[in-house]
Amino acid sequence: DAGVTQSPTHLIKTRGQQVTLRCSPKSGHDTVSWYQQALGQGPQFIFQYYEEEERQRGNFPDRFSGHQFPNYSSELNVNALLLGDSALYLCASSWRDRLNTEAFFGQGTRLTVV
Amino acid sequence: AQSVTQLDSQVPVFEEAPVELRCNYSSSVSVYLFWYVQYPNQGLQLLLKYLSGSTLVKGINGFEAEFNKSQTSFHLRKPSVHISDTAEYFCAVSDGGFGNEKLTFGTGTRLTIIP
């Protein structure tokens, strides 16, 4: 069983550009959450997708947007990149309506903005 | 609003010695508590979780944690550490009804094992 897979693993972009990160959830999971982990910090919640809709959102600007597809995979889009967007972006998947479950994390995408 | 405080940013410990990593939380509602481990250039792996029931929770790799509601703490312990335990450890809290909602993380504790 493949766990949560993210692509690409590393990415270098220039300020002002746009980027798309991808996530495939663990088999059977229907919910995808995205986190940003800046260097030396804990992960911060960006948003969560369930049934192809954004269900919860953290304190991130509208430059950060997402999408969930019918197969539960998800994309994170960031527009007008800033140097401060450089971070490890983590995707987590889970079952939304099951008790006693936890989120499984992918290996992350390391985004560097230059 | 929820928050998590990890009191120690770095903890050096000799191999085979015991270790305790401290975590305090604040929340206005019932909480679910987690400890995750992150090895270099890796994602997060769940060590253990508290959702309800016994306040002493056992996890993988010999780790355990105790939920203390009166002190709003969820400290992580291991009686004897190994070199392979060198990693970053994150405490997290969720107020989701199913235990898998938005996670609020602490800033992490870097555990370094000294041979």
Image: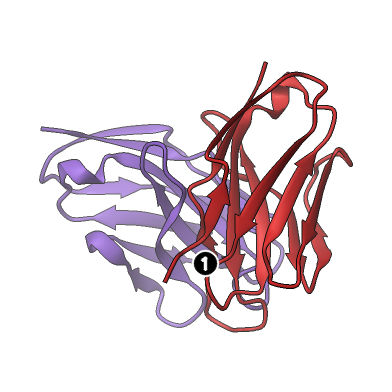
Chain colours: A red, B purple
At a point 59% along the width and 73% down the height, the residue shown is: B99
Q: Mark 1, residues whose alpha carbon is within 10 Å: few (<14), some, or many (≥20)?
A: few
Q: Is residue B106 visible?
A: yes
- Left-right relation of A99 to B90: right
- Left-right relation of B23 to B77: right
Nearer to the camera, A43 or B17: A43
Placement of B63 over or under A77, stated as above or below: below
Quadrant of the snapshot with the C terminus of chain B? top left
**Residue B93 falls in which quadrant of the image?**
bottom right
Say how many tags the image has: 1
Nearer to the camera, A52 or B12: A52
Q: Position of residue B98 (x, y in %)?
A: 63, 78
Placement of B49 over or under B22, stated as above or below: below
Nearer to the camera, A65 or B46: A65
Nearer to the camera, A20 or B1: A20
At a point 59% along the width and 74% down the height, the residue shown is: A29
At a point 41% along the width and 74% down the height, the residue shown is: B55
Q: Position of residue A28 (x, y in %)?
A: 56, 78
Q: Position of residue A38 (x, y in %)?
A: 60, 32
Secondary structure beneath disc 1? loop
Quadrant of the snapshot with the N terminus of chain B? bottom right
**Residue A95 falls in which quadrant of the image?**
bottom right
Which residue in the protein does label 1 denote? B69
